Amino acid sequence: LLADTVDNVVGIFNATAVLLDSSLIGLADLQRSTEDLPWSTGLFMTCFWRSREETASLLSAKPTCGLVEEGHSTALTCETTGCSASTLTWRTLESRSSVVVTCRSNGCGGLFDSYFPTTMSSTRSTLTISSVSRVTPFNMETKWSCSPCSRGYRTVCDKLQVYAKPQNPSCTLSENTGSGDITSVTVTCSTSKVYPQAKCSFFKETNGGNSVKVNNGPVYTHTPIPATATTPVYYRSQCSVNVSVQELGEGTHSFLGYIYPGVTRGKNLVNGSPADKDVTLSFPQVSQTCLTNMGQGYFIGKSARCTCRATSDGYPRGSAQWYKGDQTVGTNGDLDITYNKNNPEQVYTCEAKSTLGRKPGSLLRAKFAFIVPDSVQIASSSSKVNLCDNNNQVQMTCEISRDHVSPAPTFSFSVDGPRSQGPQPGTDSSDGNYYQSRFSLSPDVGGQYQVTCRVTNSVTNTWQIKSTQITFNKAPPGPPQVTVTGQTYRGISPSNIVTLAEGYIGDVTCRVEGGYPGAHSTQLKCGQLENTGDGNTATVRFTTVTLTRDLNGTVCTCTSQHDSGCYNNRETRYTLKILYAPEVTFTKSSPRTEFNKGDNFDFTCSAQGNPDPTSVILTRERNDDIIKSVQSAHLTHALDSLECLDTGVYICSGQNSQGTTSKEISISVNCTYMVPVERPDIVNTLRTTETSRPGHYEDIDGVHNTTHAPLVSTSSPPLLRQDQNITETSADTHTTLVSASQPPGNAQYETISDMVQQSGLYNSTSSQDVEPPNIYRRPKPETSSNTDHGVSGTYNNYAPGDHGETPDTGPRSKPTETTVTSLPAKNYVNVELTSVAGNTSNRKPHQQAYENVDMS
């Protein structure tokens, strides 16, 4: 029934509803017994209309309902606020008449008032159940209602909850196995009598700790105990819960079971029952062992083997297992670990493993200490640097792969032995694959530097090294040094003057000192002399052929190269000053060489040398007298009105500090010659230890009468019995026979033979030859101070008079020096210049004789 305008609609039948101001209120289990209704049996509905206020009053009576143990008392209260209760009725669904007690103003009573003492006041009525029973006088486990002010019933208690506590409650524990090992435990609690059917709750304690509820759902078994006329129905209840060992875990576990009537808050009605025994579960005991040597907590090397072993079985039985996080590793408890640069410290645990799960064991932090041989690398920003550059610093990077060393090493650097930097820790490379360290080198001195990087593993105290060579080129500090005759010269300077005498034999050396590496392509150049050395030195050698006056004033240079490219002061210059003896120019005013008596001509002599000549002297051969001398470089001399004795060789000499140089001019004045009638003495044979002089003769035994001796020269040694002039014989001219028109030449030899038949030749010394003697040279005028007319071997017409005059007497034997002045006129005497030493006896080898016809 739905009515928007009525205050209340109450339907009485089975289960009906009241819609009040759109609020739905359920009214359960309405009275449907026909005996309680005032109408005949049938389908009907009665509606009551009440005001809103009355309805509110009725509904304010709150139902009161609770738990009550069978055989115990309880009270129910019906609130009557909102009406003056002069009449109130209690009823149940289980009583035969439905009405249990009726209260009026004079008191309460009814059919069951002895079971249910009841009181009423103006605001409430209280019904007391003296002994709750499900049998007598009826089953009180039912719905209780009250009707205040006779305005309809309302529920005081939907259903009185009646219970009977469990009798003989107990709990047992059993172990469940599989494959010989415990897998779970079952805790079973039971009671011989309970009402209603029992419920169970289970709790466990581990190692005497806090009690924890077991949330696994129990399995129930209920067996009814049938009701009798005097007893209601009861139950034998049993409940079991199964807990796996994984849920239990390690430890000693005890259980407490609560079996209680299945009513609201039934657990609070009973005490727990402990299980008959405890169960103790345990993991196996495990331990770890590593077979690799360790130092400072590191494995020495790149790998290690460790074992994880169980020392007890555990309950349930288990095993030992390596774990890395939640992942099992290793095989049969053996773990092979290798270094991983991305995870240098690997963490493992040796754990016990069983159906209980895992029990963390000892922790293994696997760290490795090693350094791999030949694993260090070193690189430089440049392998060659010129110290003249603005940036002369070289940066080196030393690195080692993280695959090749652990833990992070230290770096140290050394240069040519001594340590220069370190040890110090390195840094990570940009890609994270290397440890590295940097070192800078910027020396002041050039050279090749060996930089060594030492990478040290501080745990193992082992190291690896790597070296690199860095060349720092530095130009030499000064120019090349030229050394001549012990004197040194450097650079470009006007004062670099090297004074040498012409014909000097010696070395000129150019050398570049200092710098690194040494200078190269050193070139020494002086005129046509040039030498380029491979290194820092070049040498040229002056000889008598190469060091001539033509090099005077020559500028010589020494240059060199250097790898640095900045050897700017690389040249030395010096000027040669060549000292040489004068060069003489000797001329005459006439081109002729033969003159007549009375002719005239001039000599001109000049000399040039370095230093300048100090004097020029004119002399005549074989005469120490100086014809003319000047203290300059130029001389002239006139020969006027030539005479026969002017025939000869004239010598001009120039002199300076380097020596004397001479030039000769030979002239002859045409005159009549005379020949001595006596062969000159043969001077003694020269020994090798004697010094030859002009005019020496030598007689060598054994010359054949028919042999004309050839000229003696370097390539034509003297023959047997050959006479030669030791010092002045020409090497390239066969002498010409002397005649009136051909005066003797310088140091001339000729054969003396057949003079009788050859007219005009005046060379025979044979005593049979009657030709007039030839006057070779005018003797000096005899004065009181000049009585020396020479010694033996030269004959002349001594007496004053014309040349060619016939002597008064025949040839005389050689006079002695003491008698020469007393000889009669026109006698022949030894006048001058012939050697006084030697044999004075005459030897006449027929008509084969030699004589010097010029020097006498």
Image (tube, rainbow, N blue to C red):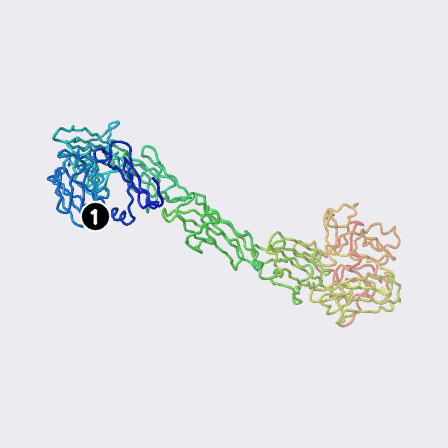
Query: What residue is disc 1 on?
Result: 80
Farthest-out residue, top: 179
Q: In this image, 187 relative to 430: left or right?
A: left
The amino acid type, in three-letter code, at marker 1 is: Thr
Q: Does the image show residue 564?
A: yes
Residue 484: x and y, percent?
A: 63, 61
Q: Does the image show residue 313?
A: no
Q: Nearer the viewer, residue 473 or 329?
A: 329
Q: In this image, 709 relative to 236: left or right?
A: right
Residue 784: x and y, percent?
A: 76, 72
Q: Nearer the viewer, residue 597 or 483?
A: 483
Q: Residue at x 13, y 28 (%)?
A: 228
Q: In this image, 837 relative to 351: left or right?
A: right
Asked if 416 appears above or below 88 in the picture, the reply is below
- Image quadrant for the C terminus? bottom right
Q: Quadrant of residue 820?
A: bottom right
Residue 329: x and y, percent?
A: 35, 36
